[in-house]
């Protein structure tokens, strides 16, 4: 039987190809390629034989239809042109003699898994008798002979997308663009990187566009089939899995069905809990399932591919009991981690389907911290509302779910609705005498009041919470409340107690080993140092918080720390770094549906753009942020964006009503944030002072802003630019663009309206001064500019006329007009500016 040829060759598998070669070079004679059906074992073996056989003769033996050692011998005998009925030694012995007498030989034995165990003995014997023969075997389980070298094939990695794109090219809907890349990535991820599934999915592009294909993946076994395929095992994904299922013993089939309830990684102890009452044999069971390539081993855990899980779930018989054990396992843990997320979500989904309110609420409470790290707030809110819809009105569990809902609302900008819920929940907590729930609700109320510009009320709520936690002796709870309190003290400008509370919170979080709390408290420490203007002290804790949050998978706290690092870069006027960090934070908040923080950083991105010179582009971002924050009822940051818009528009020359607008903003923000918060309005008033020529007043306001709150300091580049421009204007000679008028610094304007030739000469000199500052203007060019219609004048008369004109200009006050090499220019060391003369 000839070696199968595959169109398009092999994608990826470079590591596995090298592993086969390395094993053979190291003396291995029997190499078994292990993997689930459809993992690409046959293609890999054939690719190796085709490209790495060297001087070896290649024999290919497909034993898919065999069941015994006799069947194996018959297939290999045909490959060697041996007759099975010749007298003498047995067929197996004759095969050994022939292999021993041949030169170097590579024997590919494909689909070995369904052969009886005794079929491995001839291979071991042939290997011993024929030292120049190498056997590469594909199987879903080891053949278990001495000297066997096993290479396990897992799913494709990044090559999965390449394989899909390659197979798609010849299909009706197979023209893919860069815009399709995210959909392709999602498709191959849902297909577990399984080569057969990817090939079958790409084939469906004959009748389905890519997005329609992606939407049908929940029906994968109906979708992933090719009725025209000559080999049924490789023509449908379902048949490939059934082939593996049929190889398992009844006990292993039962175990695999029960393990299908796991939607994430699981440990040996987890498996034992779900396999009960057969849990005592969990190690042997898992070992056998791994050997049969249906369970995969990761660094610390075991996993089922989604495809295997879905197939095995259809075979599970004791569904309710297995799901009950699964729920009991995860809800019985003291705390949940990110690795538990998928399994807890499965427990929650099943509880909602059954209408089991108690289990649904318990699961949601267990999930709260995990969901807050990665799940967008709007998705969390929808999930929480489904749980509340089936929950009784008064219970401790319901209070925890209400708390989760208020958190999501706050993140979405719905502080008022969250406060309404919290007040009712607080009354229930007190009536039910649940001090822990009361303290948690008070903390959240403090956050809501803070976002609504009520720092004193927010501080009071945080202090109440801290007192309750301290009375209960709950260090973690007290740390959380002190963390909130530190922010409120900072908002009120009370930096010493703010720093003390943040440091105490950090120490308490560290004492109880609460890494998430340590991250939050580190951010608070850095933010307070930044608020006080100590940027060097602020940087290290924020950088540590970014690293720790990233390692913990806490995208929200990572975004907060990244955003604050962007604030530091902004204050240092490191524009590129500030823009990158703030845009990164904005995108992360958007992904998590933290709409308020996303809006704030959208505005900050616009402010950076404007301050680095793009006033128009920056305005677009700032206006979008202002509108969103106004809708959310956030007085502090709405005022911030409104003031920035007044400033940017004033810098573009639109100063009408600017002072009145800023005073309205000041009145609106007074008492609704830090006691010093109106200081940022001073900065923008300074911009107006500078634009109106009152540099002394602008500089006084700059002194206030430089010592003010962060918002004031971050607005300072606008004021510094305005002051610099004002000083440049004060030092500069001013010219009307047409040359009709000019003005020396500190002098009255000089009009040339009755001397058109002089005005035209000045205009030519000004244009040259702007375009080529150090280059003198040729006399002939100035003569042509001054008297464009008099072309017949003698050269000597023309030059004399220009000489008189230059002398007249100097006498009228144009003292920066210089002569260089008999030509003329405006002094390049003297600043000049253009203006439009009012008519």
Image: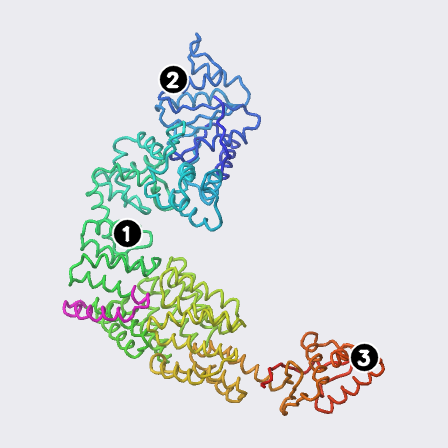
- Over which residues does the magenta segment extend? 408-434
Residue mark closest to the camera, 2 vs 3: 3
- Residue 451 quadrant: bottom left
Task: State if disc 3 and disc 2 touch (CB < 8 Å).
Answer: no
Q: Residues within 10 Å of mark 1 (few under 14, many from 20)?
A: some
In the rendered structure, find residue 70 and report the number of the disc placed on it. Answer: 2
Q: Is residue 412 magenta?
A: yes
The answer to whether residue 569 is visible is: no
User: Left or right: where does residue 12 sit relative to residue 779?
Assistant: left
In the rendered structure, find residue 778 and report the number of the disc placed on it. Answer: none
Judged by its main secondary structure, the magenta piece is helix
In the rendered structure, find residue 345 and report the number of the disc placed on it. Answer: 1
Q: Residues within 10 Å of mark 3 (few under 14, many from 20)?
A: few
Q: Residue at x 48, y 86 (%)?
A: 701
Q: CA distance from mark 2 to mark 1?
A: 51 Å
Q: Is residue 137 magenta?
A: no
Residue positioned most to the top:
87
Q: Nearer the viewer, residue 197 or 20?
A: 197
Residue mark closest to the camera, 3 vs 1: 3
Q: What residue is shown with label 3?
A: 821
Tell me: residue 455, above or below residue 84.
below
Tell me: residue 284, above or below residue 683.
above
User: Left or right: where does residue 656 sit relative to residue 113?
Assistant: right
Q: Residues within 10 Å of mark 2 (few under 14, many from 20)?
A: some
Q: Give the x, y percent position of residue 84.
A: 43, 12
Q: Reading the chain from its start, which is encountered first: label 2 or label 1? A: 2
What secondary structure is found at the residue carrying circle 2? helix
The answer to whether residue 320 is visible is: yes
What secondary structure is found at the residue carrying circle 1? helix
């Amino acid at each position: 039987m000839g070696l199968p040829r595959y169109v398009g060759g092999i994608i990826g598998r470079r590591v596995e190809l090298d592993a086969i070669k390395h094993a053979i070079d190291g003396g291995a004679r029997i190499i078994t390629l292990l993997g689930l059906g459809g993992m690409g074992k046959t293609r890999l073996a054939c690719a190796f034989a085709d490209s790495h056989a060297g001087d070896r003769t290649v024999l290919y033996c497909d034993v898919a239809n065999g069941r015994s050692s006799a069947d194996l011998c018959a297939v290999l005998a045909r490959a060697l042109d041996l007759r099975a009925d010749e007298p003498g030694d047995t067929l197996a012995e004759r095969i050994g003699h022939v292999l021993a007498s041949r030169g170097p030989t590579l024997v590919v034995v494909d689909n070995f898994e369904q052969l009886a165990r005794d079929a491995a003995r001839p291979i071991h014997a042939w290997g011993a008798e024929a030292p120049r023969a190498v056997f590469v075997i594909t199987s879903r389980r080891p053949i278990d002979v001495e000297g066997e070298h096993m290479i396990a094939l897992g799913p494709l990695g990044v090559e999965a997308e390449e394989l899909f794109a390659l197979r798609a090219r010849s299909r009706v809907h197979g023209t893919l663009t860069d815009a399709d890349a995210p959909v392709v990535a999602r498709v191959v991820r849902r297909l577990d990187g399984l080569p057969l599934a990817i090939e079958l999915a790409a084939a469906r592009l004959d009748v389905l566009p890519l997005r329609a294909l992606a939407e049908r993946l929940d029906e994968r076994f109906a979708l992933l089939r090719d009725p025209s395929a000559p080999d049924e095992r490789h023509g449908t994904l379902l048949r490939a899995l059934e082939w593996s299922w049929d190889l398992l013993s009844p006990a292993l089939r039962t175990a695999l069905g029960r393990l299908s309830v796991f939607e994430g990684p699981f440990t040996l102890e987890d498996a034992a809990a779900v396999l009960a009452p057969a849990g005592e044999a969990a190690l042997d069971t898992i070992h056998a399932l791994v050997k049969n390539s249906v369970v995969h081993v990761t660094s610390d855990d075991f996993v089922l591919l989604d495809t295997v899980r879905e197939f095995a779930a259809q075979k599970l018989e004791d569904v309710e009991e297995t799901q009950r054990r699964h729920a009991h396992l995860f809800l019985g843990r003291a705390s949940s981690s990110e690795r538990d997320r998928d399994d807890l979500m499965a427990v929650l989904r099943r509880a909602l389907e059954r209408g089991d309110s108690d289990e649904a609420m318990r699961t949601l409470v267990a999930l709260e911290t995990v969901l807050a790290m990665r799940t967008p707030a709007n998705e969390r809110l929808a999930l929480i509302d489904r749980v509340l819809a089936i929950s009784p009105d008064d219970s401790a569990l319901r209070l925890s779910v209400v708390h989760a809902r208020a958190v999501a609302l706050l993140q979405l900008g719905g502080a008022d609705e969250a406060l309404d819920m919290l007040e009712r929940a607080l009354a229930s907590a007190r009536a039910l005498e649940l001090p822990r729930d009361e303290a948690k609700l008070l903390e959240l109320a403090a956050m809501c009041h803070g976002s609504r510009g009520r720092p004193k009320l927010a501080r009071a709520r945080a202090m109440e919470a801290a007192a309750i936690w301290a009375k209960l002796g709950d260090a973690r709870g007290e740390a959380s409340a002190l963390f909130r309190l530190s922010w409120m003290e900072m908002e009120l400008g009370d930096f010493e107690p703010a720093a003390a509370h943040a440091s105490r919170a950090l120490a308490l979080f560290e004492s109880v080993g609460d890494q998430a709390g340590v991250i939050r408290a580190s951010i608070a420490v850095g933010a307070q140092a930044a608020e006080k203007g100590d940027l060097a002290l602020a940087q290290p804790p924020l950088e540590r918080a970014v690293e720790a949050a990233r390692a913990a998978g806490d995208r929200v706290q990572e975004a907060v720390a990244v955003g604050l690092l962007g604030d530091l870069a902004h204050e240092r006027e490191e524009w590129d770094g500030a823009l990158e960090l703030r845009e990164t934070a904005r995108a992360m908040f958007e992904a998590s549906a933290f709409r308020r923080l996303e809006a704030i950083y959208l505005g900050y991105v616009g402010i950076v753009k404007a301050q680095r010179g793009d006033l128009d582009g920056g305005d677009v971002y700032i206006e979008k942020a202002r509108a969103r924050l106004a809708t959310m009822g956030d007085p502090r940051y709405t005022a911030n964006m409104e003031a920035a818009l007044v400033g940017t528009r004033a810098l573009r020359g639109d100063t009408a009503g600017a002072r009145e607008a800023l005073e309205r903003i000041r009145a609106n923000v007074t008492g609704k944030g830090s006691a010093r918060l109106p200081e940022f309005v001073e900065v923008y008033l300074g911009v107006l002072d500078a634009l109106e020529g009152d540099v002394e007043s602008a500089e006084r306001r700059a002194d206030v802003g430089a010592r003010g709150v962060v918002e004031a300091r971050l607005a300072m580049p606008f004021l510094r630019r305005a002051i610099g421009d004002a000083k440049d204007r004060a030092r500069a000679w001013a010219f009307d663009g047409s040359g009709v008028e000019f003005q020396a610094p500190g002098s009255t304007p000089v009009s040339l309206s009755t001397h058109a030739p002089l005005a035209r000469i000045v205009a030519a000199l000004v244009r040259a001064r702007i375009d080529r500052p150090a280059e003198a203007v040729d006399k002939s060019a100035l003569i042509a500019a001054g008297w464009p219609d008099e072309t017949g004048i003698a050269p000597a008369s023309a030059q004399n006329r220009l000489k008189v004109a230059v002398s007249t200009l100097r006498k009228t006050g144009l003292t920066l007009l210089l002569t260089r090499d008999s030509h003329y220019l405006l002094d390049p060391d003297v600043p000049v500016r253009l203006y439009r003369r009012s008519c």
